[in-house]
Amino acid sequence: MEKSAENKIIEDLLPQKFGKQGTIWVISLLAVCALGFYAYCRQLYYGLEVTALRDYASWGIYISNFVFFVAISLVGSLITAVLRLTDVHWSTPLTRIAEIIAVSAISFAGLIIIVDMGRPDRFYNLFTHGRLQSPIIWDVIVITTYLFISLLLLYFPLLPDLKIMIGFKERNGKYLQKLYEFLGSFWKNKPEQFKITDKAINILSVTIIPVAFAIHTVTSWLFATTYRPGWDSTNFGAYFISGAFLVGAGGVLIAMYVFRTHYKLEKYITDEHFNKMGKIVVLLALVYLYFNINEFLVPAFKMKKAEEEHLMGLFTGEFSPIFWFAISASMLVPILILIFKKGRTPKWAFFAGILVVVGSWFKRFLIVTPTLLHPFLPMHDVPKNYMHYFPTWEEWAIAGGSLAGALLVITFFARIFPIVPIHETIIETDSHEKA
């Protein structure tokens, strides 16, 4: 490749400073995080009394957010591991986007669990008195493992890019230059270094797939091992994994469009990327739709009393508007959009990605809340507010703050590091020119 072409790629893909829109975006996210922090301070001071959580609806929006974060984090293993191991080269511009979504999501999944505890000062009991018989301990182990592997998969491919960015000392500024040197000054672009990192990335890619399946299966077991209508299912592991693949792919579609538009990356995140990712989303939506049919059709056919109340609450009752919106938004409408080639253009794919992510969040809310409000033993002699659940403003603020925090992590990462791998793009471009 000519030096000028290589320099052009580097110039295009180096991190860019926030413009006016970026500054407004960051300030808005910080404001939401600040409101969430204030709400959490109120929760710490007054206790969980400020929430709508009660004896029956004891999880609510916090655990819904946790399941959502765990789900969307699976995109890291989908894009980075599965497509890398199958030698799919078109996904190169998307790998770092997928990994940073995975890292930010799984980090805030852990934080939201601490919020749900009510007494964070007792968190250490998890380590001093944890029991391996508990699915909660299994979840802690696999989440920690998944976060560690995801961080390594994010860091190793970044090393050659750090070497490139260290060379732009005047552009970087004092503090960023120190950060780049701290993270990558040992990298010399030597063949033996590339050999070691390539081998490490392949090992991590193989390792993260069973860990990713484990994290979603174990999370599903937190529900399935609890004897309640709607959770008493052997289908839950596959149901969670298929849904996680879908929402993760939807999140990547959104990020692709945002970065392509605001960072002018049309040459690197092309229409063909949207076309192929759109096809993947259609496939994943069909798979998840199958598991949804399986999840609801069998208990609906049996119609045992407790299951009947739960299902009728979803299909025609209190939760039916949310249920049909979630099913339509996360699966049916995106399939109808993306199954056609015109629907896999950037703007339509972006719209479909938003539908998938929003619908999937409400789907996680429906997994948690309706079941808690329909126990096998009917509620008797309890206050009326125990029979219903709607989050208080504190819960909405904390949940919104956690979502804004995850977006802030992605935003600042894109400001500090190249969101599209520079070195890998140069190699891919060079190989295409030689071919």
Image (cartoon, rainbow, N blue to C red):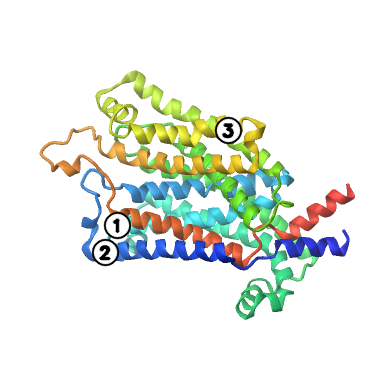
Taking the spot 45% from the left edge, 41% from the top edge, the residue there is 360
Secondary element at tag 1: helix
Q: Residue at x 18, y 44 (%)?
A: 385
The residue lying at 31 percent from left, 47 percent from top is 60
As rendered, which of 58 and 217 lies closer to the eye? Answer: 58
**Residue 343 quadrant:** top right
Element type where label 2 sits in the image: helix
> As rendered, which of 158 and 52 lies closer to the eye?
52
Chain-order first, disc 3 or disc 1: 3
Q: Mark 2: give few (<14), some (14-19) or many (20+) Cα within 10 Å.
A: some
For residue 360, say whether it is visible.
yes
Q: Quadrant of residue 430?
A: bottom right
Residue at (40, 59) in percent of width and height: 401
> Horizontally, is 81 left or right of 33 in the view?
right
> Does residue 372 sit above or below 141 in this rendering?
above
Q: Position of residue 229 (x, y in %)?
A: 30, 32
Q: Amino acid at mark 1?
A: Glu
Residue of label 3: 337
Most distant residue in the bottom direction: 174
Q: Amino acid at mark 3?
A: Ile
Residues at marks 3 and 2, CA–CA distance in whole angstroms? 43 Å
Q: Are marks 1 and 2 in contact (CB under 8 Å)?
A: yes
Tag 3 secondary structure: helix
Q: Nearer the viewer, residue 206 or 319?
A: 319
Q: Residue 86, can we see it?
A: no
Coordinates of residue 153 in the picture (x, y in percent) = 62, 57
C-beta proximity under 8 Å, tags 3 and 2: no
Question: Nearer the viewer's eye, disc 3 or disc 2?
Answer: 3
Name the residue beneath numbered marker 2.
42
